[in-house]
Each structure stands twice: as C-alpha cells, then as structure tokens.
Amino acid sequence: MAIVIRSFRADDAPRVAEIVRRCLREVNSADYPADVVDRMCEHFTARRFVELSAERRIYVAEDGRVVGTVSRDGNQVYSMFVDPDVAGRGIGRLLMDHVEALAAAEGHSHMEAGASITAHRFYLRRGYDDVRENDSGFGLTYLVRKPLQPSAG
Ligand SMILES: CC(C)(COP(=O)(O)OP(=O)(O)OC[C@H]1O[C@@H](n2cnc3c(N)ncnc32)[C@H](O)[C@@H]1OP(=O)(O)O)[C@@H](O)C(=O)NCCC(=O)NCCS
C-alpha cells in the first residue's frame, strides 16, 4: 500500500502517542539518559497531541495504519517520529518533503528543526546545517536550518 501524508485527526492521537513513545524507549534511549526519556514519554500523551493540534499543523503518514508523524508551525519542524518497525523505508523523507513544500509555498526562505542526537544525521543528510546546540529538560538537541527553494506561483 502506498504511503499517504494527511492532516492529523483527534482520533489519531492514541496511535501517534504510541509511535512517539516506542521511538523514545526503543530508539532515542540509545542517545539520551533514562530520566530524559521518561520525561518525554510523560509529555507526549495522546491528550497532548490533541492540544498541540490547536497550535501547530500535525501530519501523519498512513499505510493502512498510521506509521509516522511530523508537526509544523510556519518554517519550524517539530515532533518527527516514525514507527521503529518501518524505519529506514523513506517515511521520514516523505514527511519532511511534505512540510518543507508547505513552508516553501508560504514563502519561507528556510526551514528549521530541533534535531535529536538520534536524528541529527538524518537532517544533515537532507541538507540541513547546524546553527547551535540547545540543552533543555528534554536533553541535547541541535538547531538545524536548511534553505528552501521558493515554489512557483
Ligand atoms: C529520524 C527518523 C524520523 C527518520 O525516519 P525514517 O523513516 O527512518 O527515515 P528515511 O527512511 O526516510 O531515511 C531518509 C534518509 O535518511 C537516512 N537516515 C534515516 N535515519 C537516519 C539516522 N538516524 N542517521 C543517519 N541517516 C539516517 C536514511 O538512510 C535515508 O538516506 P538516503 O536518502 O540516502 O536513502 C526516524 O528514524 C525516527 O523516528 N527516529 C527516532 C525519533 C527521532 O529521533 N525523531 C526525530 C526527533 S527530532
């Protein structure tokens, strides 16, 4: 089945929260201390995603079922997560293509993301450059930035 990227609906929230927590426990846990992983798992509940959907555009990748998510506010990317069972199959790339194209269509000249240690190389590979490091309650992240091609029309 082909992957479709579509807008988040409130009834996606439990599955999105499940994907995020699985990533945190099974993937990001290699790069972050247990207390940071616990804090993030407590933060990213289904209810939190419904709340966030009022503040940001949230998208999901669907392949029969939801397999990944990304959020966007203007030219800022947040919360990119792909089900670890289907990682490495191009779903993260499709999600990023989607939000970068939307930001370019709105006239933004560049895109920014707060990359996890785990995803840092994924962003560098997509043409993002390091701006600075951030250290918050959610551990070390890298602010990364990439120029966008203005879209025609
Ligand atoms: C980072 C993540 C979103 C990537 O999604 P994905 O669907 O596995 O990535 P894709 O299959 O689309 O990979 C696209 C390219 O990036 C590369 N890539 C993916 N993850 C990578 C990583 N962690 N390090 C280096 N390269 C990576 C792939 O090899 C591929 O390269 P190619 O273009 O040469 O083929 C996913 O692995 C994930 O959810 N990680 C854990 C959660 C996380 O840290 N999220 C980011 C928060 S900022």
Image (cartoon, rainbow, N blue to C red):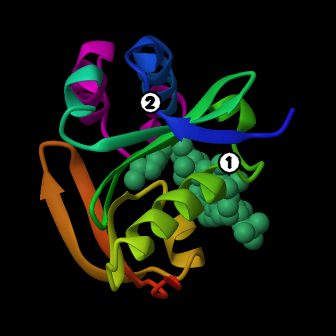
Q: Position of residue 89 (x, y in %)?
A: 78, 48
| Quadrant of picture, ligand 1 | bottom right
Main secondary structure found in the magenta portion:
helix
Looking at this view, is 54 or 135 the one in front? Answer: 54
Q: Residues within 10 Å of mark 2 (few under 14, many from 20)?
A: many
Q: Quadrant of the N terminus?
A: top right
Q: Is residue 98 left or right of residue 94?
A: left
> Would you say the beta carbon of the disc 2 residue lies within 8 angstroms of ligand 1?
no
* Magenta highlight range: 24-49
**In the rendered image of this protein, does residue 85 appear above or below residue 47?**
below
Residue 91, numbered label: 1
As for residue 70 lying within the magenta part, the answer is no
Q: Is residue 30 visible?
A: no
Sequence-earlier tag: 2 or 1: 2
Q: Which quadrant of the figure has residue 34?
A: top left
Helix, strand or loop for disc 2: loop
The residue at the point 25 percent across, 14 percent down is: 47
What's the amino acid at mark 1? Ile
Residue at the spot of label 2? 8
Q: Position of residue 22 (x, y in %)?
A: 51, 24
The residue at the point 68 percent across, 48 percent down is: 91
Looking at this view, is 63 or 126 the one in front? Answer: 63
What's the amino acid at mark 2? Phe
